[in-house]
Structures are given as C-alpha cells and as structure tokens.
Amino acid sequence: MSRDLIAVGRVGRPHGIDGAFFVEQPSERASAFAVGAELWVAGAPAKVVVSRRGGGNRPVIRLDRAVERGAELAVPRASLPPLAEDEYYAFQLVGLAVEEEGGRFLGRVAGVVDYPANDVLELDSGMSLPLVGACVRSVDVEGGLIVVAPGFAEPE
C-alpha cells in the first residue's frame, strides 16, 4: 500500500445478496464507512453506496463496484482529521523503537491491537505493552521513540 493511503479495514464476509459485506478490523472513524465516503481498494477509488450496522455492531457496506474478499480498504492520509496534542494514529506508532526508562531497548512496535479495556502495543520482540498512561511515559513520533515505565516489560 502506498504511504499516502492508510488502512481503515478489510473486505469481510458477504452480508445479504446485494453485494454488501462486513468490514473486518474497522477503523473507529464511522465517517470512513458513511454513504458517499470514498475508499481506496486495490489501487482505485470506490464510493460507499450502502452503510448499515450488522451483528456485533460491525459496519456493513456496499461499494459502487465489486471488490475481492480480504482486500484492504484505505483512505488518503491527507483526509484524516488533525489530532490534538498527545494523540496519535495507530499507524504512526508502528515501527517506533520502544525503550524502558533507563534506556533498555525492548523492541519496535509491530502493531497496535484494540482490546476492550485499552489498546496494546505488540513489539517485534514478542512483548505486549498496554497503551495506558501508567505504562507509556512519552511518545516521540518524529524522533521514532516510545519510552515506557519500568515494571511492564519482562525482566531481562
């Protein structure tokens, strides 16, 4: 995927017989799936023509063209709303180095997983850290570093 496109979900299993489908791993931004919204699929834009909620309150949409199951749904980075200070999009954290206070390198962020209680940083070292204030002391997206409090990582 182009660095100018940000994933907001994947084409999931069909819902009904009209070409609608569940959005898997949907963005929390409901506007991304609203009628009239433009999503990029397989390198080309597509318009949302039907939008509703399915089981588990997951988005169910139909696009103005057929798309393959499993295809990534994306939006242009420039279309994302600006964030307040100390707010970050999950994609901005992927790849950042993670260090414990004191300088111990723990790994790099491989992904951010949305759990019911809070998001979790999954590191390439296999470690998982909660994305909560008690654990995460600072995030420097420009500098490429997240500093976490001691006691959350596995001992050396």
Image (tube, grey):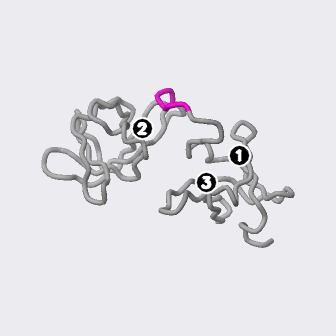
Q: Does dot 2 land on a helix, a strand or a loop?
A: strand
Residue lying at 31% horizontally and 52% vertically, measured from the top left: 12
Q: Position of residue 155 (x, y in %)?
A: 78, 72
Residue lying at 47% horizontally and 62% vertically, measured from the top left: 116
Q: Does dot 1 land on a helix, a strand or a loop?
A: strand
CB of mark 2 within 8 Å of CB of mark 1?
A: no
Q: Disc 1 designates what residue?
A: 139
Q: Position of residue 114 (x, y in %)?
A: 50, 57
Q: Amino acid at mark 1?
A: Val
- Please give the label number shown on residue 110: 3
**Quadrant in the rendering for residue 66:** top left
Q: Does the magenta segment cover residue 81?
A: yes
Q: Position of residue 32 (x, y in %)?
A: 37, 37
Q: Does the magenta segment cover residue 70?
A: no
Disc 2 versus disc 1: distance between alpha carbons? 25 Å
Q: Does dot 3 land on a helix, a strand or a loop?
A: strand
Q: Earlier in the sequence, mark 3 or mark 2?
A: 2
- Please give the label number shown on residue 74: 2
Left or right, residue 99 beside residue 111:
right
